[in-house]
């Protein structure tokens, strides 16, 4: 089976899947297209222990009564483009960063399901399959951040051919993917790798960011927490939407301290904190109010001008 066979099992759609290694402007308006983002392989050593595999176990907890597909051993980063079936063009686009602790990627819960929801809003979704597991001897986020920089620049470079507005390209990240979204929001001035083609001449700064139960944004210190040193928030950090539950074992201080840093820098931000919800719920509805966050996020996208009023008629995520 091809390395992209995982998506066939979890797309939950009748549209075709196309896998392209070149000519990325072709056939992108029909179906879901997967493209390797590094034409000659990702920079640095490969950390995968073998072929890509689903590492979720029967003993793992269920989310809204359903299992989660967790992909690990990713050495060939790719993007899968989900195009809305209708709507005005050019469209906004959002690059999706699934979570998984930098060990694996929750590709259905925080990837495909999120992409389908974004399509319902008239947004092009670009699902990034970044490198995991984390390498040894370097920061855990280094290789994923290289992939994120490459992916956003790549999308902006192909914006015209993909019917995307290059001034409305954002990111959404969950858990470790939320950390990745925050890192990219503040580390976009220079590539962490040697440029490989013209796509790397494009800006990789997101125009906006949505961070859902993000992890690793703070470090514990005696008596409390502080913002992680690698997050250099400035006035150039993009407008940001934040959501987390107070009882999240990853700690609600992640969004609280990041929000305060955004406020000090004069960056428009919106934060929602819920009493209960834990961690890792994605868009799956439960009885807990926190799982209604997609409706709040959609309203925020209108508030900051990413979506026009005409795009607000889509159904909320179930």
Image (cartoon, rainbow, N blue to C red):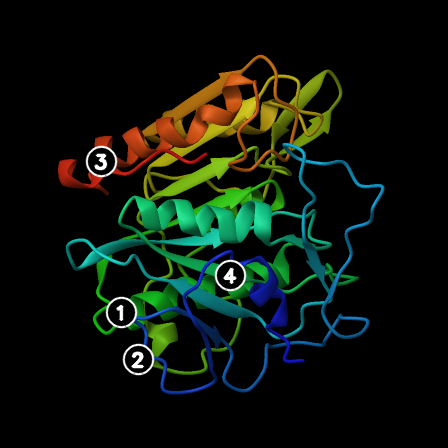
Badge 2 density bin: few <14, some 14–19, many ≥20, Cα 10 Å:
few
Q: Does dot 3 land on a helix, a strand or a loop?
A: helix
Residue 136: horizontal and vertical position, in percent? 79, 62
Image: 220 above or below 13: above
Viewer-closest of 287 and 148: 287
First in sequence, mark 1 or 4: give its number. Answer: 4
Marks 4 and 3 sit apart, C-alpha to C-alpha, by: 25 Å
Mark-to-mark CA distance, 2 and 1: 7 Å
Task: Say which element carries label 4.
Answer: strand
Q: Is mark 2 in CB contact (under 8 Å) with mark 1?
A: yes
Tell me the tag on residue 128. Answer: 4
Which residue lies at the image location 45% right of the left edge and 30% below the top edge? 242
- Per the image, the residue denoted by label 3 is 312
Comparing 310 with 194, the one in front is: 310
Q: Distance between the residues labelled 1 and 4?
A: 16 Å
Left or right: 58 in relation to 118: right
Q: Is residue 97 visible to us here?
A: no
Q: Residues within 10 Å of mark 3 (few under 14, many from 20)?
A: some
């Amino acid at each position: 089976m091809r390395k992209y066979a995982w998506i066939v099992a979890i797309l939950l759609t009748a549209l075709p899947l196309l896998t392209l290694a070149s000519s990325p402007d072709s056939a992108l308006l029909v179906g879901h297209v997967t493209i390797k983002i590094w034409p000659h392989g990702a920079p640095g050593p490969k950390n995968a222990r073998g072929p890509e595999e689903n590492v979720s176990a029967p003993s793992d907890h269920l989310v809204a009564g359903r299992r989660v597909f967790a992909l690990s051993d990713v050495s060939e980063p790719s993007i899968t483009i989900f195009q809305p079936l209708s709507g005005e063009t050019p469209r906004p686009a959002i690059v999706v960063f699934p979570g998984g602790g930098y060990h694996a990627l929750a590709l259905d819960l925080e990837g495909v399901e999120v992409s389908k929801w974004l399509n319902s809003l008239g947004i092009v979704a670009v699902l990034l399959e970044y490198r995991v597991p984390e390498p040894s001897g370097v920061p855990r986020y280094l290789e994923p951040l290289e992939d994120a920089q490459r992916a956003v620049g790549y999308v902006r470079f192909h914006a015209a051919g993909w019917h995307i507005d290059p001034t409305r390209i954002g990111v959404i990240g969950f858990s470790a993917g939320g950390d990745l979204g925050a890192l990219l929001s503040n580390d976009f001035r220079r590539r962490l790798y040697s440029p490989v083609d013209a796509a790397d001449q494009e800006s990789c700064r997101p125009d906006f960011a949505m961070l859902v139960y993000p992890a690793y944004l703070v470090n514990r210190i005696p008596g409390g927490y502080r913002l992680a040193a690698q997050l250099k928030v400035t006035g150039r950090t993009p407008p940001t939407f934040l959501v987390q539950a107070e009882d999240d074992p990853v700690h609600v201080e992640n969004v609280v301290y990041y929000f305060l840093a955004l406020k000090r820098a004069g960056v428009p931000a919106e934060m929602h904190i819920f009493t209960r919800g834990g961690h890792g719920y994605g868009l799956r509805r439960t009885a807990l109010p926190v799982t209604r966050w997609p409706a709040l996020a959609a309203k925020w996208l209108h508030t900051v001008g990413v979506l026009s009023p005409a795009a607000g008629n889509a159904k909320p995520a179930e």
